[in-house]
Amino acid sequence: MRKTHIAIVLIFIACMGIYFYYRSRPEAVDDHMGPEIHMEETTINVPSNASEADILAGITAVDAMDGDVTGNLFVEQLSNFVEKGRRNATIAAIDSSNHVTKTIREVVYTDYHSPLFEMRSPLVFNVGSVSPLDYLNAYDPIDGDVTDKIVISDKFSISTSTPGEYPMLFSVTNSAGDVSELPVTVSVRDPYAENKSSGPTVTLSTGLINVPAGEGADVFSYVQSVRMGNITYTRRDDGNLHTDADWERLEIPEQLTMYDMAVEGPIDFNTVGSYELKLHFTDFDGNDGWNRIIVFVY
């Protein structure tokens, strides 16, 4: 019986020792609280290409067990825009026990504008070879290249076998839910009929120019060449179109300037929107030729 009592006492002492040992260890204390997140500014202004570190600037996190866990802060989620250029960032901090604390910070992009399109040349195609998406790119100040997100509206259709002018609408959406739309006119032409035309052929360096609202644009500077019969006028460093032909003997102008071009179509550089213009030139016999350019004011 005495041995039994001794054994019980020893077991009791051992258990108490184990209890007090683990009770004294800091890591054994139950950690039920996540870190505390501190930020003086609930709204932060950043550029459109801001990094995660930019959005987290000025935010700290402290945990009761781990101490400073600012290095564990991260942006868990960015919302769609609540209004253009403004969105909410969900900020989270995590401690060593995997407890997470979250807060919201408003993010304002100081230089934001909606996604912009680029068009390598006017959308003019021969019958049977219409591929407008091959000529378009789109770029967003937040996401970068968003060309793969361009979609064509199913409200319009094109007959690839019938010459004519066809309306079309492109759109692109960025990761913040902002949508840009580009209405265009697609020209489908019969090359055989075009060859019989005696009007000038106007070649442009691009099919679209993007202009900030309030600024103007010299659309003549995008005219690369004008061909009138066998005479071609090509852009040179002085900004005008010159010919290498014997212009004195032929009694034709040596150069074409912006004053030789007529612009058809309304445009307001102070109002955001898409403006489609026709740039006209008239040859020596009074025949008209033109090409189309889009001015996108943003």
Image (tube, rainbow, N blue to C red):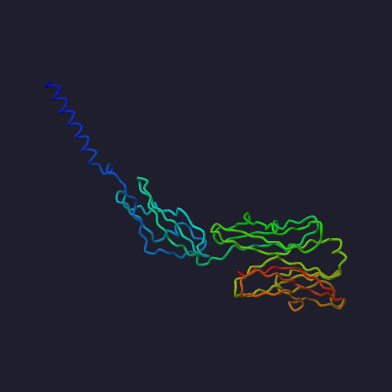
Give me the residue at 46% from left, 62% from top.
107
Give me the residue at 46% from left, 56% from top.
52
Observer-nearest of 252 and 170? 170
Question: Which of the 4 image quarters holds residue 5?
Answer: top left
248 w.r.t. 1: above or below: below
Q: Position of residue 288 (x, y in %)?
A: 82, 73
Question: Which of the 4 image quarters holds residue 289?
Answer: bottom right
Residue extending farthest to the left is 2
188 w.r.t. 221: above or below: above
81 w.r.t. 27: above or below: below
Position of residue 78 in the picture relative to residue 224 (left or right): left
55 w.r.t. 16: above or below: below
Q: How many marks?
A: 0
Q: Position of residue 26 (x, y in %)?
A: 26, 44
Observer-nearest of 151 and 284? 151
Position of residue 38 in the picture relative to residue 293 (left or right): left
* Image quarter in which the C terminus is found: bottom right
Q: Position of residue 80 (x, y in %)?
A: 51, 59
Position of residue 116 in the picture relative to residue 120 (left or right): left
Position of residue 145 in the picture relative to residue 20 (left or right): right
Question: Which of the 4 image quarters holds residue 215?
Answer: bottom right
* Image quarter in which the N terminus is found: top left
Q: Position of residue 241 (x, y in %)?
A: 76, 73
